[in-house]
Amino acid sequence: MDRPQAAPNKLWFLKHIRLFDGITPSEMQEMERITRMEEVKKRQPLYLTGDPSSNVYLLKKGRVKIANTAPSGKEVTFDILEAGEIFGELDVLEDAPRSTSAETLDDALICVIPRKDFDQYLAMHPNVTVKLTKLIGLRLKKIQSRVEDLVFRDVPARLAHLLSELSKTDGVADKQGIRLKAKLTHQEMANLIGCSRETVSMTMGQFRDDGLIQMDGRTITILSEKGLSRFLD
C-alpha cells in the first residue's frame, strides 16, 4: 500500500519564496529558525495603515491585497500578491508605521518574521539584502506605472495594461492564448485601475466581444495580445 504523501513543511515553503532563490541550505535553515507559520482565513487583515511595523511577511499560499483608503473613503489597491512574495518589508526597513494595509483574499498560509530577527538576518547575509533591494525596486516601479496609468490613460487602456502586465508575470500559454493564473474579481480589477466595478464589467465585455479575451467564470484567457496593445499606443 502506498504511504500518504507528507504535507510540505516550512522549509519547503521557504524554498518557493522569490527572495531566497539561490541561497545556501545553511542560510535557508537560519531563515527557518526565525520564522513562524500561520494559517489565516480569507478576508482577514494582517495589518492596517498606521500600525507599528513589527513583522515582515512571506506569502506561502493564497493571495494578499496591499491597499490604502483615500480621503474620499475609496479604496485604492496597489498590488495583489501571489504565493512566493515578501511584503511589509519596506516599512520595517524604514522604521516607519504601516503606510498601507494588507488583507488576505483567500485562506492563506503566511510566514511571519519579527523585525529584529529580519534586520539581523539581512546584516549577516548581504546577498539577500541585494535581492531584496531589487524586489523593492521592481515593486515601486510597478506602482509608479499604475499611477501613471491613472493620470494619463482612459479605462480601456488601464485595463488592457493590467491584463498585459498579468500575462507577463502570471500567464500560462495554451492552445487558445495566454491564460491568467490570477483569478481576479471585477471589483479587484476596478480597485487596481481606479474605476468602478460596473465600468470594468462593461469594458471586459467589450474586449470579449472584440475577440481580445475569453472569460470562463473568473478565468481570463488573452486571445490577442496585439489587439490589447492597440489600447496602449
Image (spheres, grey):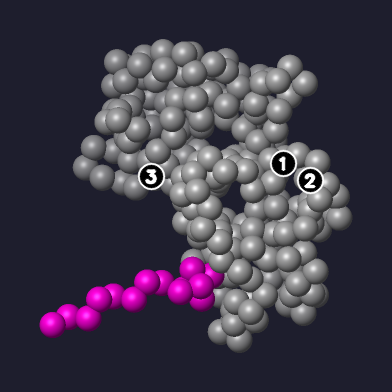
Q: The residue under label 1 is which amino acid type? A: Leu
Is residue 126 in view from this perspective?
A: no
Q: Residue at x 23, y 37 (%)?
A: 176
Task: Locate residue 165 relative to residue 78 in the image: left or right.
Answer: left
User: Which one is earlier in the sequence, the residue at label 3 or at label 1?
Assistant: 1
Residues at marks 2 and 3, CA–CA distance in whole angstroms: 32 Å
Which disc, if any, is residue 48? 1
View extreme (left): residue: 1
- Position in image of residue 9 (x %, y %): 46, 74
Q: Is 75 on the left or on the right of 13, as rendered?
A: right
| Residue 207 visible, this orientation | yes
Q: Is residue 12 magenta?
A: yes
- Which region of the structure is painted magenta? 1-15
Residue holding disc 3 = 181
Q: Position of residue 230 (x, y in %)?
A: 45, 22
The kind of residue tagged 2 is Asp
Q: Which residue is mark 2?
A: 51
Name the residue at 64% across, 76% down.
Answer: 31
Residue 102 picture quarter: top right
Q: CA distance from mark 3 to mark 1?
A: 27 Å
Instruction: Compare marks 2 and 3 and give the one earlier in the sequence.
Output: 2
Determine whether 13 is above or below 184 in the image.
below
The secondary element bearing badge 1 is classed as loop
Q: SS for tag 3?
A: loop
Is the residue 25 above or below the residue 84 in the image? below
